[in-house]
Image (cartoon, helix red, strand yellow):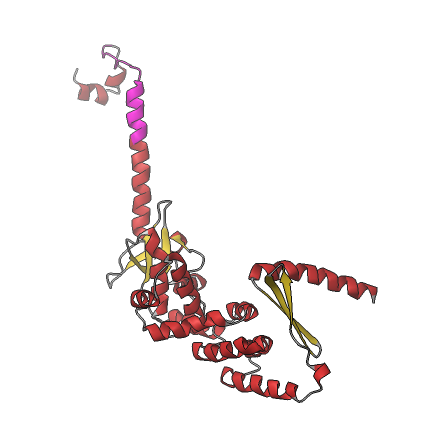
Amino acid sequence: MSSFSKLAAGVNPDLHPDKPKPERRNVSFGEKLVKDSLLKSNEALKQEVIKLKQARLDNKGLLHVAITDLHEIPGRKRTLDAEQYSQLLENLRHNDLVTPIVVRKREAGGYELISGHNRTQAFRELGRESIPAIISDIKDQDANKDAFFANLIHPALPDYEKFVGIQGFIKVNPGSTLDNIAKQIGISKGHLAKILSFDRLPTAAHELLKANRGALGAQMAIELAALAERGHSELVVAAIELIAKSELEQTKAKDWIQKTIASESKKPAQEVAKPISIKKGKAAFCNMRRAHKVIRLEFQSQEQAETLEKHIHEFLKTLAKTD
């Protein structure tokens, strides 16, 4: 009887006693390794397919990468004020992104943001899953520099932001002359010197400007630095504080300081206290000046100011309890 005839008769040929059963054999260790390796390869291939779906080309030929794959490096993000960021957000809500972000691949997976931090933040807030990007092969030592250069050419970048970036560039390129730095950055030596004038401002002024980077332009920094160097540091800091609070226009800061100086000079001598210099050994430790009801302390470094601030705070709290 043929196999077909047996099936028609309701007989399964595979269960027929005359048919020899297949021989069973043990799977060798080597075969198991090959099988496991193939399974892992298939899983890796599956993950690559998922990434390719996430990082796709749009109809303009731009590569899109998943927002969740992007990683920020502290210090690279350009600071925008609330109005600037709101304008960017609304622009991207209604329009396509014209300029792609720039990223580079990470060994640990995903991408490291070089430029485009605010655009990425806006896309994240808008609930977008991916963003157009250019993947650049940038070396470790050039990543921060390229990120800064990308921001430097932006017209809305505050002068103090440029100053902070140039300081960072100088730090990793010690010994460079102003000529070389200006050439590498792509600005004139005169403009570079103008930006670096922020370095002449008192330490307390920098604390204010770090929190309000668009408060002061480089030209006004030159004028206020000159006044600080003539012994009016406390008034320079006071003026910058008023500017940061929008209580004084920066164009009127110099006049405000000069009028305050003239006003103080007309008051009785006892009302205008002379500055006191406190030394630690032979080195200057702190300068103190009282103007009416205000006492100003200026230390040689930010670390000293932060340390002493805690002690002064505790001391004042003790005084408040005893009164």
x, y (%) of residue 88?
Answer: 41, 71
Q: In the rendered view, would you say 112 is above or below 253?
A: above
Classify residue 16 by image quadrant. Answer: top left
Nearest the eye: 281 or 70: 281
Q: In the picture, which quadrant includes the C terminus?
A: bottom right
Does residue 323 appear to the left or right of 197 in the view shown? right
Q: Residue at x 69, y 62 (%)?
A: 312
Classify residue 177 by image quadrant. Answer: bottom left
Q: Can residue 302 be seen in the rendering of this structure?
A: yes
- The stretch drawn in magenta includes residue 114: no
Nearest the eye: 17 or 115: 115
Q: In the picture, which quadrant includes the N terminus?
A: top left
Q: Residue at x 42, y 55 (%)?
A: 73
Nearest the eye: 73 or 242: 242
Task: Farthest residue to the top: give it.
Answer: 18
x, y (%) of residue 309?
Answer: 65, 62
Nearest the eye: 45 or 311: 311
Magenta part of the chain: 18-37
x, y (%) of residue 236?
Answer: 56, 77
Q: Residue at x 63, y 63 (%)?
A: 279
- The stretch drawn in magenta includes residue 25: yes
Q: How many marks?
A: 0
Classify residue 25 by image quadrant. Answer: top left
Task: Farthest residue to the right: give it.
Answer: 323
Q: Can residue 245 be seen in the rendering of this structure?
A: no
Q: Residue at x 29, y 21 (%)?
A: 30
x, y (%) of residue 182?
Answer: 32, 68
Task: Farthest residue to the front: give it.
Answer: 282
